[in-house]
Amino acid sequence: MRVALFATCVNDAVYPSTAVATVRLLERLGVKVDFPAAQTCCGQPQFNTGYRRETEPLMHRMGRAFDGYDYVVTPSGSCVAMVRDNYPRIAAKGTDPRLTRVSDSLVPRMYELTEFLVDVLGVTDVGAYFPHKVTYHPSCHGLRMLGLGDRPTQLLNAVRGLELIKLPGAEECCGFGGTFAVKNSDVSTAMGADKVNHSLSTGAAILCGADNSCLMHLGGILRRQDAPQRALHLAEILASTEQEPWS
């Protein structure tokens, strides 16, 4: 089984610890992970802003970078949704037949991390230890477009020492939405504040999610409030063990 990590732009530039944690976790489960150095952006920011043609070269690059792998795994539901949902649309509207080949090849091999763990590896207990109270925010892409369902919470419930507390209003959008947060900043901030208030009401020490884009938005609000809670990606919790120096 040849597995490649798609780190994504946000993780590469801002949250590299999430990509590292993903590799540590998969290797602990016996999976050999490659990191194709040619990988770059999947094109989601360009496409969401209306630049379909500018997205096409990035599709070609993704196709070349991940050619030959059985699975492409990423700790980002929004990027998986971009490939699965939007690559076929871009290919259908484009004039380059190679785009269809890229889409047809990459779409069935692209997996969000929790999907890969539960559906491909068939595990929910990954041997993690994280002695904290945690609440989980399901991002819109994972919840609505990928249908991740209870895969993330199955994994969290199996972590030793972790107490999972249900998040009120969990299915409500956090307000990030990529360029939505830039174009509609007041609305985005208000939505994020509502989500943070719900999160703080749980008394959890950690607000967990499977998309660092959402966690960047919510974590920023938490920091500005000097709140007693921090945002942390699911992969970093699942990669932790009893040897980790948790404070």
Image (spheres, grey):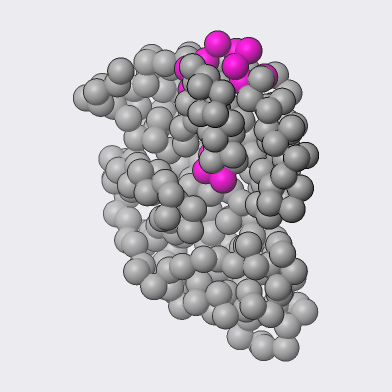
Q: Is residue 10 visible?
A: yes
The quadrant of the picture occupied by the C terminus is: top left
Question: At which x and y percent is residue 18?
Answer: 40, 44
Q: Is residue 193 magenta?
A: no
The residue at the far left in this view is 243
Q: Is residue 209 visible?
A: no
Please give the name of the residue rendered at 62% of the width and 62% of the height, measured from the top-left corner: 44
The part of the image, by quadrant, that contains residue 171 is top right
The quadrant of the picture occupied by the N terminus is: bottom left
Q: Nearer the viewer, residue 106 or 8?
A: 8
Q: Nearer the viewer, residue 215 or 131?
A: 215
| Bounds of the magenta segment | 198-213
Q: Nearer the viewer, residue 213 or 142?
A: 213
Q: Is residue 167 left or right of residue 232?
A: right
Indicate whether 127 appears above or below 162. below
Please give the name of the residue rendered at 54% of the width and 35% of the height, measured from the top-left corner: 220
Question: At which x and y percent is residue 118?
Answer: 50, 39
Count of picture labels:
0
Q: Is residue 169 left or right of residue 127?
A: right
Q: Is residue 87 left or right of residue 227?
A: right
Question: At which x and y percent is residue 2?
Answer: 36, 62
Question: At which x and y percent is residue 192?
Answer: 68, 33
Please give the name of the residue rendered at 24% of the width and 23% of the height, measured from the top-left corner: 245
Indicate whether 30 appears above or below 4. above
